[in-house]
Amino acid sequence: MTKPILELKNIQTVVNRHTANETKILRGINLTIHTGDFITVVGTNGAGKSTLFNVIAGHLPVDAGQIFHNGVDITHTSEEARTKFLARVFQDPKLGTAPRMTVAENMLLATKRGEHRPLFPRKLKSQIPRFTKLAATMNNGLENRMNTATGALSGGQRQALSFLMATIKRPDLLLLDEHTAALDPHTSRNLLKATDERIKQDHLTALMITHHLEDALKYGNRLIALKNGQIIADVSGDQKEQLTVKDLYRYFE
Amino acid sequence: MNLIVSAIGQGLLWALLGLALYLTFRILDFCDMTVEGTFPLGAATAVTAISHGMNPYVATLLAVLTGMAAGLITGLLYTKGKIPSLLAGILTMTAAYSVNLRIMGKSNISLLGQQTLFSSQFLKSLPQYFDSVFVGFIAVAIITLLLVFFLDTDYGQAFIVTGDNLTMAKSLGIKTDTMIIVGLMVSNGMVGLCDALIAQNNGYADINMGIGTIVIALASIIIGEVAFGELTLTQRLMAVSLGSIIYRLILLAVLQLGFSANDLNLISSIVLALAMMVPRLDGLLNVAHPILKGVRTHD
């Protein structure tokens, strides 16, 4: 078994602490993610999937428990510092790209994820051939719009760009938060296919939230189901191959 | 002719204010009210220092530094104190009023008989009002070049994306709080420079000289955008300066119609309001379309 790249130990989060509305969101999450894992995450609304992602990304503080990256405790490491090894693609196409900046400018920003940004000229032109080649791998015409402001792109192109940006500098862990949910079925399928190819080709480690159960079964080598802030199922390898949609429905009851 | 030269000179000097606000208002998407306090603050600092015998260049630099300090305070109130941007600016602006009175000791200081940036032999040898055109042009050119360089660096790009998409900027590891504070400091430092120059050109500092300055700065930005349309970032910065000059020429025209200088703030607001409503009016009245159609060969 490969070594864990990320470990969550008994993670708990609470909202509205010390008020009448105090609610536990995550109730003791234990999860070990190994290098090369492609985990699909399923669960009902309110199960804590997005909270789990926010906790991993450092966007939300934990109320109890610890997070380790390559064995180093990062529980209290800031969101900015975690971007050195972690990349995200959001569900909302508007969140992942800067609307007034061009496709190439957005990609250039992403190549320096988590790095110090000095007061030196950015040298955009010399990178454009490389960016154009990368954009062409998405098969949606993005490569012809390198100098277009991303605000003028279609939702599918924006999400494809967000995905490219998340992987342009190899992350140790890639978080995909329903990144195809806002797209039409055809565009969604294409982006998922491209996602899967890229993850396999680069041997990336990824977590992908999806409400589409067929996708949860089709992609990835491992599946976890969340319910009421706990992991109620963690299936991988052959066992996952044998899962059916019917099996998954049980996790939602 | 003299009046037009004077208007161009004023337009260039005030263009620095427009450029300063462009950084916060347009790039950071932060409506920074601090400016109304920083404006007299820079003037008060420069004029008081000069009247105590300080070298005018050093006094101008001092005005830049006090402006940056004001920007720092607004930035800290907003990012660390979580006070809404508009209110954070108003707090600093209001506090600055008292600070300005403390610095000046009274509400108006004259620079009569003092050495200023405008006292050099060369500037005095120029025809009337050409001194402000010369100084304004040099200052605007240097600041514009510095901004163009800055915004094209990796750091500058991180600054731009902070204003364009905060969530994404954070997810790329950009320290957005720092970017906002730096932006406010640079912007208010530029305001400090602008008002130090204007006070030395006018020959006095007055406690009330900040009133209405935001509207003037926004007017130059909006007029520049309305007049020149879709532009690259570098061209946009230049459009702000041209917008500032156009604004002064509009004011000049209005004053020629018989309005008095007391009406200036009213006129400024009307000019800005009209400029901001152009896209809306355009939709209602469909004015621009036939005009553009006449200019373009193919539609």
Image (spheres, helix red, strand yellow):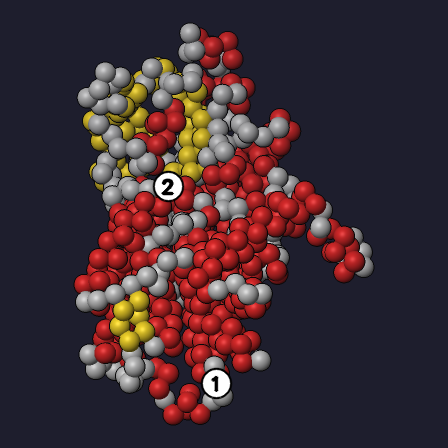
List x then y, in percent, for residue A117: 37, 58
What label does residue B188 carry, if any? Answer: none
The residues tagged by marks 2 and 1 sit, at their Cα atoms, a distance apart of 62 Å
Secondary structure of residue under mark 2: strand
Determine the residue positioned at 27% across, 29% down: A8
Kind of residue indicated by mark 2: Leu
Determine the residue positioned at 64% across, 41% down: A140
- Name the foreground residue: A185 vs B257: B257
Secondary structure of residue under mark 1: loop
Would residue B142 be seen by someone viewing this image from the given angle? no
Determine the residue positioned at 29% across, 63% down: B207
In terms of image quadrants, where is residue A223? top left
Residue A71, compared with residue A242, is above or below; it is below
Residue under pointer 1? B128
Of circles 2 and 1, the one toward us is 1
Q: Are marks 2 and 1 on the same chain?
A: no
Would residue B89 be seen by someone viewing this image from the given angle? yes
Residue lying at the far right of the rendered structure: B297
Few, some or many residues within 10 Å of mark 2 (<14, 14–19, 20+): many
Residue under pointer 2? A86
Kind of residue indicated by mark 1: Gln
Residue B188, compared with residue A196, is above or below; it is below
Q: What is the chain identity of the residue bearing mark 1? A: B
Could you tell whether A54 is left or right of B22 in the image?
A: left
List x then y, in percent, for residue A227: 36, 15
Few, some or many residues within 10 Å of mark 1 (<14, 14–19, 20+): some
List x then y, in percent, for residue B166: 41, 44
